[in-house]
Image (spheres, rainbow, N blue to C red):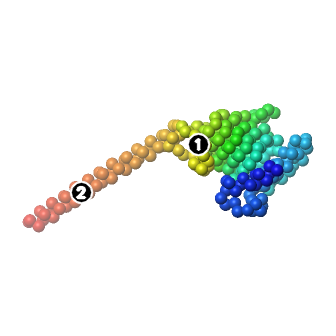
Amino acid sequence: MRFIEDINSVFERDPAARNIFEIVTCYSGVQAMIFYRFTHWLWRLKLKWLARFISTFARWVTGIEIHPGAQIGRRFFIDHGMGVVIGETSEIGDDCMLYHGVTLGGITWDKIKRHPTLKNNVVIGAGAKILGPITLGNNVRVGSNSVVVKSIEDDQTVVGIPGKVLKSGTKDPEHFDAYAVVNQDVDDPTVKAINSILSHLHDMDIQLSKVSEELDIKNTADTSVDDLEIETK
């Protein structure tokens, strides 16, 4: 069954995981998925009120809100979990991973496809917001606290508000920091301006240090001359 795959996939993604019993009893992300698998089954049976009621109870228990109408693939993992929201028309592929505080949200009240679609092997960092009926391609990585409102092609890494694609994406999750947002390669005018100011301040510190050294040398030399004149007298 799929929830068994969800449990087993934790060992590949969290080095702190020790055994299945610990994962089932202590990992809120896994608990939320167990509830979701059951409520989604009820949703498909048209028992929608019961599905919503149980999913609301699951939110109280886990701090994670997954609408039973969402479609989630295999080996899905929510790390830490608290504050994750997955909307009704969200679609998530296989081997995806979300960190705490992630929102897959809608931007309209119309009863249409209004939530994001995540293809396979997508990783979304802590606090990121993916909004609207957009698509994140295979192997996409989203940095923490980013806000993404446009579709992203395969194998790209996105950071910032609004989310911008880095000059070079990465397929390797081991080289992706789900908690980092600042990167020297980000084509963001705000980041560039801050980096420019910091560079200017660094240059000023160097110049002041040189001036201070020259003044110290001059003062030392003047003191030596005065001492010599006193001794001569």
Mark 1: give few (<14), some (14-19) or many (20+) Cα within 10 Å.
some
Mark 2: give few (<14), some (14-19) or many (20+) Cα within 10 Å.
few
Can you name the residue that lies furthest to the bottom here? 231
Residue 217, disc: 2
How far apart are labels 1 and 2 at the CA level? 53 Å
Residue 219, x across and y down, in percent: 23, 58
Amino acid type of the residue tagged 2 in the rendering: Ile
Image-quadrant location for residue 146:
top right
Which residue lies at the image location 28% right of the left edge and 55% below the top edge? Answer: 213
Q: Nearer the viewer, mark 1 or mark 2?
A: 1
Q: Nearer the viewer, residue 101 or 25?
A: 25
**Residue marked by disc 1:** 170
Mark positioned earlier in the residue sequence (1 or 2): 1
Residue 17, x across and y down, in percent: 69, 60
Residue 135, x across and y down, in percent: 69, 35
Amino acid type of the residue tagged 1 in the rendering: Thr
In this picture, is 52 found above or below 137? below
Which residue lies at the image location 80% right of the left edge and 51% below the top edge? Answer: 3
Whether residue 139 is visible to the viewer of this picture, yes or no, is: yes
Which residue lies at the image location 72% right of the left edge and 53% below the top edge? Answer: 9
